[in-house]
Amino acid sequence: MQSYANTRVNGQVFAPALRDRRPEQVHDRIAELKEQLESVQREYSVRRAQRQEARRVALVGYTNAGKSSLMRALTGSDVYVENKLFATLDTTVRALSPEVEPRVLISDTVGFIKKLPHDLVASFKSTLDEASEASLLLHVVDASDPSWQSQLSVTREVLAEIGAQSVPSRLVMNKVDRLSEEALLALRSELPEAWFLSAKNASDVATLRQRIILFFEASYVEAEVLVPFSEQRLLAEMHATMNVD
C-alpha cells in the first residue's frame, strides 16, 4: 500500500505529489527525445536521398580508432575530435579535399563498441545507414591497440547487423606512427591487403585520397559521346557524374 505521508529532509517538507510527478516528467522527456530523434532521422533521409547518386565513402570502426581525425585530414574540415567514447554521435558528411569531379563524399559514423545494445543501434540508425548505403567502407582500426583484432570483429558484427556486410570495403590500419618498425613490419606481413597510415601524416593521407579515387575510377568504362547542341544541359550532368577527357 502506497503511503501519502509528507517527507521531511533537512527541515524541508516534500509533498508526495512532487515525488509522484517524477515518473511523468521522465516519460514526457523520453517522448520529447523520441520526437526529436524522428525529426533528425527524417532530415537525414532527405539528405541521403539528395546524395544517392554521389560517390560515397563511409568511415567505420571501433570507437576511438581515429575516424574523426582521418575525416578531418581527408576533407580539410573542422570535425569534432576527442579521445572518448562516442565522440561522434551524428553523421558528418564532407567532400573529399581537394575536390574532384565527380565529387566524393566522406561520412564519419558513430564509433562501435562491444555488444552494442539493440536499442542503441536503433537510436543511431540514421548514422549507421550511411554505412549500409555507401559505395565504399573504410574499416578504420587503431593499429597500436593490442586488442585491434577483437575490435575489428565487433565492427564486422555490427555491419552485418545493419546489413552492410556486402558493401565493398578496405581495411585501414591507422596510428602506425605509434608502432615500432618491427611491430609495423609484422603487421604488414599479417595483413598484406590492408592500407597502413597515420592520420597525422600528410603523405599518408594523400596516398589514401588517391586510393579512394582509383577505387571509383576502376569501374569506369571509356566511351565517346556526341552531345547535340539541343542537349547542352547534359554537359553539366556529365561533368558531375563522369571524368570528361
Image: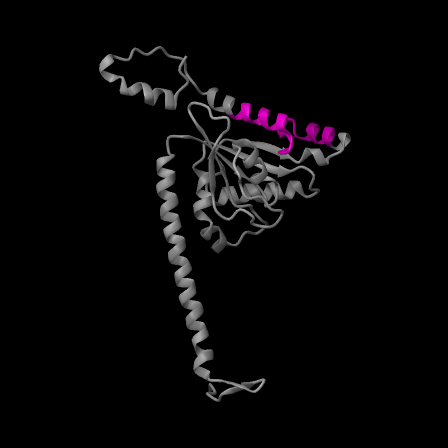
Name the spot of residue 47 as percent of width and height, x first.
37, 40
Magenta stretch contains residue 208: yes
Task: Tell me if 131 is positioned left or right of 181 in this view.
Answer: left
Residue drawn where x is 59% and y is 28% of the image = 205
Name the spot of residue 88 as percent of width and height, x first.
53, 46
Q: Quadrant of the C terminus?
A: top left
Name the spot of residue 226 as percent of width and height, x first.
30, 10
Relative depth, front residue between 13 and 187? 13
Rendered image quadrant of residue 10? bottom right
Numbered circles on residues, count: 0
Rendered image quadrant of residue 143? top right
Residue drawn where x is 57% and y is 27% of the image = 208
Q: Characterize the magenta stretch by its predominant secondary structure.
A: helix
In the image, residue 17 sits, relative to residue 167, either above or below, namely below
Task: Tell me if 168 is positioned left or right of 152 in this view.
Answer: left
In the image, residue 74 sits, relative to residue 115, either above or below, namely above
In the image, residue 234 sits, relative to residue 76, either above or below, namely above
Residue drawn where x is 37% and y is 30% of the image = 53
Rendered image quadrant of residue 138? top right
Say if residue 193 shows up in the picture.
no
- Which region of the structure is painted magenta? 184-212
Name the spot of residue 41 as percent of width and height, x first.
39, 48
Magenta stretch contains residue 209: yes
Say if residue 117 shows up in the picture.
yes
Q: Seen from this angle, which residue lies furthest bottom? A: 5
